[in-house]
Image: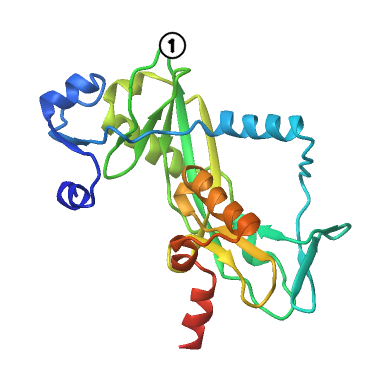
Amino acid sequence: RYEWQKSAGLQIEHLTARETLQAEPFVSPDVRESLFFPNDWQVENRRLLFALEKYAELNCIKIIENAEISNLLIEKNRIIGAETETEKFFAPTVVLATGAWTSLIKAESFILPQVKPIRGQMISFQTAKRLFQKVIYSPRGYIVPRADGRILVGATVEDVGFDKSMTDAGTEFLRETALEISPGLGNLEIHEKWAGLRPFAADGLPIIGAFAEVENLFIATAHYRNGILLAPLTAKIMAEKIAENLDSEYLKIFSPQRFRAARAT
């Protein structure tokens, strides 16, 4: 892993066990070595969403919650909006950022790419002060330290449909993962437990771009485990395409048309 990431141009350092413990004193004393990524950062998703809601409020942008889109409204191969069971929304341009629920939406005359949900269970601990400085990965999972003392532990990968429930087996797996990385966490009670659904495409890659079949219909989904992290770049690419008709190599690589080509063969 070190060699191929180094050859890819990523900044990476190979640390000995001693150097690892100097950098993160609370990891397991059984650590043998580690790889350190100086430019690996994290996003506090709760604060990001709060900021997004505040931005929408300040700019008079209306966010409609609990409105399940069931159908796309299409006239003469051009998108004109979308509808729920009780309401229609009209717009000259539509972006499907619909995550794991994308495939449940019906579209006249063509089929949307298949995207399925993959459940990820997580837990967290709460400490009085921050114990770790960086996100720490092991072969089985990871811990994410937050500035407020929370330590997030993730995550399971389960193909169970739209079931977002927590399981005893999942919780135990996550607790064991945390203790493997830092045995000292065994003295803490689990503070929070939750699960989410990641959108996963058939080839495991994001789906970004326009549909050849319907004018002004775009999609941005299937980022799987990196949705929050890739959201800013995805938004930039989509905004530049829609507002300025600027193309990106990523629109070609991750185009929804690749699934149409695969079906044709």
Badge 1 element:
loop
Crowdedness near tag 1: few (<14), some (14–19) or many (≥20) residues, C-alpha within 10 Å: few
The answer to whether residue 162 of the structure is visible from this angle is no
| Residue 99 drawn above or below residue 231 | below
Q: Is residue 7 left or right of residue 193?
A: left
Q: Position of residue 32 (x, y in %)?
A: 12, 34
Q: Is residue 132 above or below residue 77?
A: above
Query: In the picture, residue 240 is in which quadrant?
Result: bottom right
The image quarter in which residue 39 lies? top left
Q: How is the model colour-coded?
A: rainbow
The quarter of the picture where residue 62 lies is top right
Q: Which residue is mark 1?
A: 128
Q: Farthest residue in the top direction?
A: 128
Residue 227 horizontal/vertical position (percent): 51, 48
Say which of 79 and 116 sits in front.
79
The reply to whether residue 263 is visible in this rendering is: yes
The percent coordinates of residue 21 (x first, y second) are: 18, 22
Number of on-image labels: 1
Left/right of residue 44 with respect to residue 22 in the rendered view: right
Identify which residue, 170 or 156, lies in the foreground. Answer: 156
Q: Nearer the viewer, residue 192 or 203?
A: 203
Q: Residue at x 44, y 66 (%)?
A: 253
Residue type (three-letter) at the residue carrying disc 1: Ala
Q: Residue at x 33, y 23 (%)?
A: 133
Q: Determine the residue positioned at 35% across, 37% down.
A: 142
Q: Between 124 and 132, which is closer to the camera in this rendering?
A: 132
- Does 37 appear above or below 210? above
